[in-house]
Image (cartoon, rainbow, N blue to C red):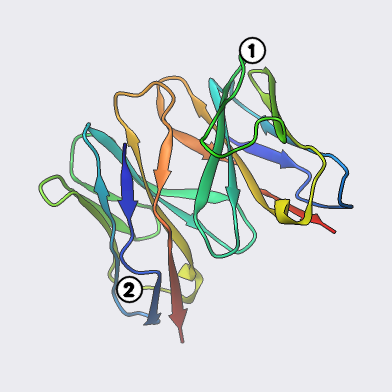
Amino acid sequence: AQSVTQLDSQVPVFEEAPVELRCNYSSSVSVYLFWYVQYPNQGLQLLLKYLSGSTLVESINGFEAEFNKSQTSFHLRKPSVHISDTAEYFCAVSDSGGSNYKLTFGKGTLLTVNP
Amino acid sequence: GAVVSQHPSRVICKSGTSVKIECRSLDFQATTMFWYRQFPKQSLMLMATSNEGSKATYEQGVEKDKFLINHASLTLSTLTVTSAHPEDSSFYICSASLQLVSEQFFGPGTRLTVL
């Protein structure tokens, strides 16, 4: 069984400040890791993912996450946030050896960027 | 590419009626489709996993007779909420995965309100 813990349910920050959203996972098998973003009343959009290779992955809008196997973490960071980054962020994990890529989600972190 | 649509986006129905929600993969053939339920300010809860042409696999605690899932083709899955009650009001999100692509692609969600 897998589990995902997002340590912060809410993170308020000011515009242009750096932010880190924390994610830890638990799994007995090798995993794929994902960050999804959800805007109000919308579905989920993939922000970035780690499947293999470089442990640092980046998104097109300035977010990055680093896979740390020893600490079983996949924290999301952005050096300077915008108001438009306000959204709910979900960390998720799937079994890399699975055949249907079933996801286990964390409870989400609401990022609120204030002017 | 990899677009998933849901219809309707919003539905309001009376208690006791049945509601069908469609999930379509628009530009790819989905090996597997997933149905999630999301309560306000909470994470996604996987309800069931379905593969084309076979019976859906329901998660523990999800009533299969109440939430009927049909996956008739590689591009269409439907979720029917039978004899809906106010407690079934929720945001329902589907996703689809593509063989050999290690991620799920999410639909925009359907807001169900049962009066």
Quarter occupied by residue A99: top left
Instruction: Give the percent coordinates (x, y) of residue B20.
Output: 80, 37
Give the residue pinned by disc 2.
Answer: A80
Residues A6 and A15: in front is A6
The residue positioned 86% from the left and 51% from the top of the image is: B15
Image-based side of B64 in relation to A64, left or right: right
Amino acid type at circle 2 is Ser
Report the residue at 32% width, 73% height from top: A80
The answer to whether residue B36 of the structure is visible from this angle is yes
Mark 1, residue position: B53
Q: Residues within 10 Å of mark 1 (few under 14, many from 20)?
A: few
Q: Amino acid at mark 1?
A: Gly
Chain ID at mark 1: B
Residue found at x 68% / y 39%: B5
Protein chain holding label 2: A
Is B79 left or right of A115, judged from the image as shown?
right
Q: Position of residue B55 (x, y in %)?
A: 62, 18
Q: Which mark is residue A35?
A: none
How far from the left and from the top, in percent, is residue A57?
26, 48
